[in-house]
Image (spheres, grey):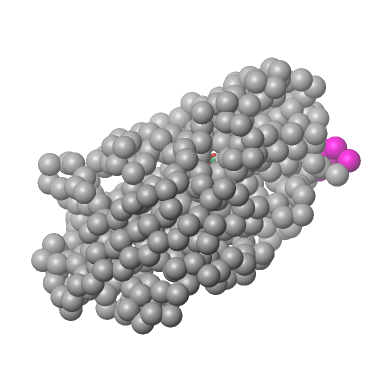
């Protein structure tokens, strides 16, 4: 593990330690809907967050709830950037508290004011907030990778910003502009740089949230909104080669219906899949594959991944038509496959076609590409390939992850270099 950076020295400094591990009271009132309470308990930090040179050099102006202010500055070359003291070889996909989160509130005029980084911690919400009572909330998910040269890469963050905008429109929320979203993601990643896994060990998962944080009793859009970003280091999904998943087709419950909200990342869509997913897991399956709710014959997607089938040189995936989440990995895989000479079709894909495919795989930010080893439909199990990891799935996974990690030239212009 790398060490010896300026940050490591500061780590032993009690002042800096205080900054990283704030007392509970300092973070308890971050999202209070009353701005006076907000100011009384907590002055957000850093009021200034600057990258000053080619070498990482930051200065944080901080003021804590007792009114005292101090500044913490450190600089470290990318080669000596200190890492958080955790077991980087055994990262899973779980929440790990990091140093900072980002918060931005929507003013009365429907515009988001300037956001700020705050120490990571619990938030406070009115019991009558729109998100708690009526599910007025959206989430996003993307990753930052650290490259060997110290650069940090984001993958198509403006696509997440646009998708959040679409989702916000569907559930009557104002949303940050694409620029505000991307700038906020960058600031949050840079502030938590020591939590980005070293190259090859994983990535920093970035979770933006948009929620109706204001209090509302009757069913109506909330009077106030909060955009929040937190991050957590996660491991590479496939540590020792790709492991195929086993899916079961759900024939009773549906994830989405025409005219509903299946096409946006609204929080309610995920509570709705827990029952079928839990039942599937109890029977030893990895997850559930949903069918369309009208014909009960065409594929939709998995709980939080899109699905593809491969037959010879043809790759097919269900078309986006309101009930399927438009995955950014899905969209990227389509373009990568086309560039590699595959024929790609977005259309209805029937269960019969699925069961007759050469290969099946799923896509999503967390897994990138996940090969499907078997599908069970009405008690009948169909297995794919010899070990379930198809050649096409493997090839597409390798091409896209190389691009995301900065190991291959990005001819698509998809990656955003942060630093
Ligand atoms: C997030 C999500 C996906 C994958 O989207 P990506 O942008 O590729 O991460 C697919 N399906 C559902 C239901 C999702 O929530």
**Image location (x, y in percent) of residue 390:** 80, 36
Quadrant including the N terminus: bottom right
**Image location (x, y in percent) of residue 372:** 74, 42
User: Which region of the structure is painted magenta?
Assistant: 380-386
Q: Residue at x 29, y 41 (%)?
A: 180
Badge count: 0
In this rendered view, identify the residue nearer to me: 117 or 271: 117
**Quadrant of residue 49 in the image?**
bottom left
Q: Which residue is drawn at 51% across and 36% down?
A: 415
Q: Which residue is drawn at 68% across and 34% down?
A: 399
**Image location (x, y in percent) of residue 291:** 60, 36
- Examine the rendered structure and indicate whether residue 228 appears above or below residue 298: below
**Quadrant of residue 407 in the image?**
top right
- Examine the rendered structure and indicate whether residue 405 appears above or below residue 56: above
368 relative position to 155: left or right: right
In this rendered view, identify the residue nearer to me: 7 or 327: 7
**Quadrant of residue 177 in the image?**
top left
**Image location (x, y in percent) of residue 230:** 40, 57
Asked if residue 194 lies in the magenta stretch, the reply is no
- Examine the rendered structure and indicate whether residue 320 appears above or below residue 243: above
Can residue 85 be seen here? The reply is: yes
Can residue 249 be seen here? The reply is: no
Q: Which residue is drawn at 85% across and 37% down?
A: 385
361 relative position to 252: left or right: right
Q: Residue furthest right?
A: 386
């Amino acid at each position: 593990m790398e060490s010896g950076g300026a940050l490591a020295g500061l780590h032993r400094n009690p002042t800096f330690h205080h900054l990283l591990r704030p007392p509970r009271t300092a973070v308890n009132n971050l999202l209070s809907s009353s701005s006076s309470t907000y100011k009384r308990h907590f002055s957000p930090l850093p009021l200034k967050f600057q990258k000053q040179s080619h070498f990482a050099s930051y200065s944080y102006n901080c003021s804590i709830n007792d009114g005292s202010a101090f500044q913490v500055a450190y600089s470290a070359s990318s080669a000596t950037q200190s890492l958080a003291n955790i077991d980087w070889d055994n990262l899973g996909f779980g929440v790990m508290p990091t140093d900072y989160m980002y918060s931005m509130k929507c003013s009365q005029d429907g515009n988001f004011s300037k956001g700020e980084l705050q120490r990571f911690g619990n938030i406070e919400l009115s019991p009558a907030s729109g998100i708690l009572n009526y599910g007025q909330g959206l989430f996003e998910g993307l990753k930052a990778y650290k490259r060997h040269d110290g650069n940090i890469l984001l993958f198509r963050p403006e696509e997440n910003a646009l998708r959040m905008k679409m989702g916000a429109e569907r559930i009557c929320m104002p949303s940050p502009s694409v620029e505000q979203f991307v700038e906020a993601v960058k600031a949050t990643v840079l502030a938590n740089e020591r939590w980005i896994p070293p190259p090859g060990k994983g990535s920093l998962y970035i979770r933006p949230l948009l929620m109706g944080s204001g209090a509302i009793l009757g069913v109506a859009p909330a009077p106030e909104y909060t955009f929040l970003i937190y991050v957590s280091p996660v491991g590479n999904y496939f540590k020792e080669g790709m492991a195929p998943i086993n899916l079961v087709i759900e024939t009773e419950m549906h994830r989405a219906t025409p005219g509903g909200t299946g096409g946006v990342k609204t929080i309610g869509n995920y509570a709705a899949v827990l029952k079928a997913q839990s039942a599937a897991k109890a029977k030893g399956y990895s997850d559930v594959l949903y069918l369309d709710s009208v014909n009960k014959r065409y594929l939709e997607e998995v709980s939080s991944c899109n699905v593809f089938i491969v037959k010879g040189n043809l790759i097919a995936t269900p078309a986006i038509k309101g009930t399927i989440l438009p995955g950014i990995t899905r969209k990227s895989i389509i373009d990568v496959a086309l560039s590699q000479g595959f024929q790609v079709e977005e259309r209805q894909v029937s269960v019969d076609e699925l069961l007759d495919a050469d290969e099946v795989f799923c896509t999503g930010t967390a897994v990138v590409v996940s090969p499907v080893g078997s599908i069970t439909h009405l008690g009948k199990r169909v297995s794919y390939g010899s070990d379930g990891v198809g050649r096409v799935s493997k090839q597409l996974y390798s091409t896209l992850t190389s691009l995301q990690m900065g190991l291959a030239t990005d001819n698509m212009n998809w990656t955003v270099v942060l630093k």
